[in-house]
């Protein structure tokens, strides 16, 4: 049974930094894709940043230059370093891990709250 567990959310002032961590376990295979999504109240869930097994990354335009995603393929962990945080970054952040074998299932964490406020 695959489990995805996030940690590191919290309350931070505008301009501050937070580091989110995610660990995926329960699979003998590495995950092809690991990424962070977020969902603000009344809005759809959106991709924030993702990284493939080979290290290719993609970011939402709104976070480019401020957020950095990295992963440890051996331990199936992914980290999102968030700098220069803005109030509009406030949301529940979810980690997703996508299997590298058919049917390429998606596994989601329970989410962690990030609040940017003075």
Image (tube, grey):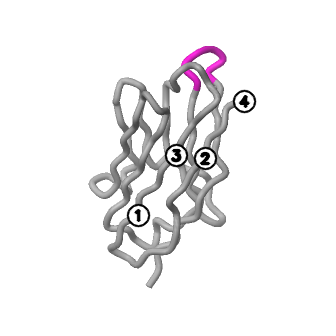
- Inspect the magenta stretch and tell me whether residue 101 lies in it: yes
| Label 2 vs 3, first from the N-terminus | 2
Around disc 1, counting alpha carbons within 10 Å, would you say few (fewer than 14), some (14 to 19), or many (20 or more)?
Answer: some
The front one of 63 and 7 is 7
The image quadrant that residue 52 belongs to is: top left
| Alpha-carbon span between mark 4 and mark 2 | 13 Å
**Residue reaching furthest to the bottom:** 118
The residue identified by callout 2 is 5
Q: Are the two marked residues, 2 and 3, in contact with CB atoms closer than 8 angstroms?
A: yes
The residue identified by callout 3 is 22
Query: 23 above or below 2?
Result: below
| Alpha-carbon span between mark 2 and mark 3 | 6 Å
The residue identified by callout 1 is 18
Local secondary structure at mark 2:
strand
Figure quadrant of the C terminus: bottom left
Q: Is residue 48 left or right of residue 56?
A: right
The stretch in magenta equals 99-104
| Alpha-carbon span between mark 3 and mark 1 | 13 Å
Q: Which mark is residue 1?
A: 4
Local secondary structure at mark 3:
strand
Q: Which mark is residue 83?
A: none
The residue at the point 49 percent across, 33 percent down is 76
| Alpha-carbon span between mark 3 and mark 4 | 16 Å
Figure quadrant of the N terminus: top right
Q: Position of residue 50 (x, y in %)?
A: 44, 39
Around disc 2, counting alpha carbons within 10 Å, would you say few (fewer than 14), some (14 to 19), or many (20 or more)?
Answer: some
- Inspect the magenta stretch and tell me whether residue 46 lies in it: no
């Amino acid at each position: 049974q695959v489990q995805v567990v996030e940690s590191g959310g919290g309350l931070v002032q505008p301009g501050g930094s937070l580091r989110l961590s995610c660990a995926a376990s329960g699979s003998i295979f590495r995950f092809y894709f690991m990424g962070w999504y977020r969902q603000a109240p009344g809005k759809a869930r959106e991709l924030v940043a993702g990284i493939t097994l080979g290290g290719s990354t993609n970011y939402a335009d709104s976070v480019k230059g401020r957020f950095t995603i990295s992963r440890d393929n051996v331990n199936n962990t992914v980290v999102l370093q968030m700098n220069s945080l803005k109030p509009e970054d406030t949301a529940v952040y979810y980690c997703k891990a996508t299997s590298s074998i058919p049917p390429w299932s998606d596994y989601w964490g329970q989410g962690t709250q990030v609040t940017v406020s003075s």
